[in-house]
Image (cartoon, rainbow, N blue to C red):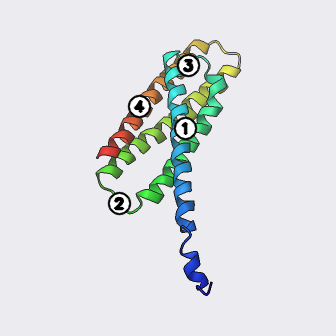
Amino acid sequence: MDEPVGERLNLLPPLREDVMQLALVLAISLHILAATFWAGSTFALARTAGNGSGQLFAPQLLAAVFAIGTGAYLWHTLHEGSFRTTEQWLAAGACSAILALAIQAVVVGAALRRLRKPDKDSIRVRSRIALAYRATAFLLAIAAVAMAAARYA
């Protein structure tokens, strides 16, 4: 009973490490879930020539922002200050994903806005959407391969 308070507290697991571990698990889970939705829906839209892109555009952008944001957090937490082979693979994947987001936001977003207006060029606009989704599917495949390769680099 006369044990100092500090020694009793040392019996408890360090709270900061538990919180950090939980933050990492949540960040990794959100990163994987968001990236899976983003890539999977992009692959489906690439396969269907962009049919349904109007309904999935906003959720895809949100998933992309979550995937890239959690990826940036994970980079900062786990890889800051290092740029070895693992980080080079991760950087290649991240650049590919960021480029895919830019193409989707700019090209698909502009094309969808244009489709809302009555226009004679809707076939051309739809082909632009299909091409953009095919390009971003390719970029997201590169990102997925790079992220997987980083694990074993």
Q: Helix, strand or loop at disc 4? A: helix
Give the label, 1 or 3, closer to the camera. Answer: 1
Mark closest to the chain's N terminus, 2 or 4: 2
Q: What type is the residue that disc 4 sits on?
A: Ala
Give the label, 3 or 4, closer to the camera. Answer: 4
Check the image and report above or below for 48 versus 150.
above
Q: Mark 2 = which residue?
A: 82
Identify the image quadrant of residue 54.
top right
Mark closest to the chain's N terminus, 2 or 3: 3
Q: What type is the residue that disc 1 sits on?
A: Leu
Residue at position x 38%, y 47% from top?
A: 90
Give the label, 1 or 2, closer to the camera. Answer: 1
Give the label, 4 or 1, closer to the camera. Answer: 1
Mark closest to the chain's N terminus, 1 or 3: 1
Mark closest to the chain's N terminus, 1 or 2: 1
Q: Which mark is residue 141?
A: 4
Q: Mark 1 = which residue?
A: 33
Q: Helix, strand or loop at disc 1? A: helix
User: Are the residues tagged 1 and 3 within 8 Å (C-beta)?
Assistant: no
Q: What type is the residue that disc 2 sits on?
A: Ser
User: How far separated are the C-alphas under marks 1 and 3?
Assistant: 22 Å
Q: Position of residue 97 (x, y in %)?
A: 46, 39
**59 vs 113, nearest the viewer:** 59
Q: Mark 3 = which residue?
A: 50
User: How far separated are the C-alphas under marks 2 and 4?
Assistant: 25 Å
User: Are the residues tagged 1 and 2 within 8 Å (C-beta)?
Assistant: no
User: How far separated are the C-alphas under marks 2 and 3?
Assistant: 39 Å
Identify the image quadrant of residue 139.
top left
Residue at position x 56%, y 69% from top?
A: 12
User: How far separated are the C-alphas under marks 1 and 2?
Assistant: 26 Å
Query: Quick check: 144 left or right of 65?
Result: left
